[in-house]
Image: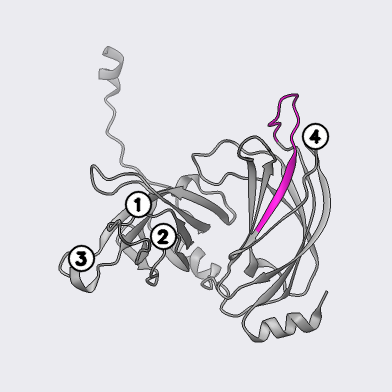
Amino acid sequence: RDVNKAVRNQERGVGLLEVTVISAERLPAVDRGGSSDPFVELLVGGNKQKTKTIKKTLSPEWNEPFSIEVPAGASSLECSVYDENFAQFNTFMGTVVVCLDQLEVGKDTVQVFPLGNRSLAGSIASGNLRLLLNYFAQGKDTLRYPEVDMGDVRQKAAESGAGSCTVTIVAAMDLPVSDPKNSGLTCYAEARANDYKAATSVVEGSRQPVFNAPVLLEITPDCQVVEIVVFEKASALNIRRGDVPIGIATILLASLPPNPSFLWYDLMPVRPGDARMGAIKVVTDPHFIPELKLNRPRREVSRVRAN
């Protein structure tokens, strides 16, 4: 551990995350013969590292340490497990996303994480990944979640049945551009829950924008979904045209797990005829989701029996 280097990096807004990839268990069998050749790819911001490959096992042990610089604004560590293939693309086996702000700075913690999919449409992942984590030096401008007063949440739930959920729009990828001559894109994203809306800041010149924008949404009893809409910002020459919606992701509140979860959601076209393209990465942390109250049609029992 180079403490002096960590201090110098911290002075320029760069943090240091120490990660030891210990082991995995119950991985899916990808290769013929019921085995796999797994390795782990680690990603923080734009910094990427990988473990060695362990041959023919579903319970690999790596015990491989890494020191990863955390650039300003980076919010998570993403560990993806792959099966190594030489003749074709590596096979994705599952991923783990760790929110950096949930790690205690300067303290070693060993945690076991269930492997999940990159999107709801992905194949079913299985197994666990064991990591030793130490956020040794925290960088500047890391993602800060809104403070939630659970007493206030419980009071509102008791009085009006309303709930709340923190939704963090992390990033998007492979967004389409309206002008083929431009490789970049000026865009922003907007979270919607019924009549409530909250937008991220505008990101210029990227089809892979990073937003890192958390918002606290109030969820009314009749609210079923949270929508994330990505817009292309109108240029000065097209200001009269207005901002153009690129795609929309719909998150069903009833399907959210009780703990914070990181998922990629495919963006669906907003207008008929538009091509489906891109995805958006969202962190959801439901504090209280009210039970949906539906007005059912009145049953005529005698008529039902007669039919």
Which label's residue is closer to the chain start, 3 or 1? 3
Query: Do labels 3 and 4 touch, CB within 8 Å?
Result: no
Which residues are drawn in magenta?
Answer: 28-42
Q: CA distance from mark 3 to mark 4?
A: 55 Å
Query: Mark 1 highlights which residue?
Result: 248
**Secondary structure found at label 3:** loop
Query: Mark 4 highlights which residue?
Result: 56
Q: Is residue 154 above or below residue 80?
A: below
Which label's residue is closer to the chain start, 2 or 4? 4
Q: CA distance from mark 1 to mark 4?
A: 41 Å
Residue 109 is drawn in which quadrant? bottom right
Give the residue at x 31% y 15%: 305
From the top left corner, tell me how far across and down residue 71 is, in percent: 61, 73
Colour mapping used in the image: one colour
- For the residue marked with disc 3, what is the amino acid? Gly
Disc 3: CA contacts within 10 A as few (<14), some (14-19) or many (>=20): few
Q: CA distance from mark 2 to mark 4?
A: 38 Å
Q: Is residue 186 magenta?
A: no
Q: Main secondary structure of the magenta part?
A: loop
Given the current orientation, which residue lies at the most extreme left position?
A: 240
Give the residue at x 68% y 81%: 9
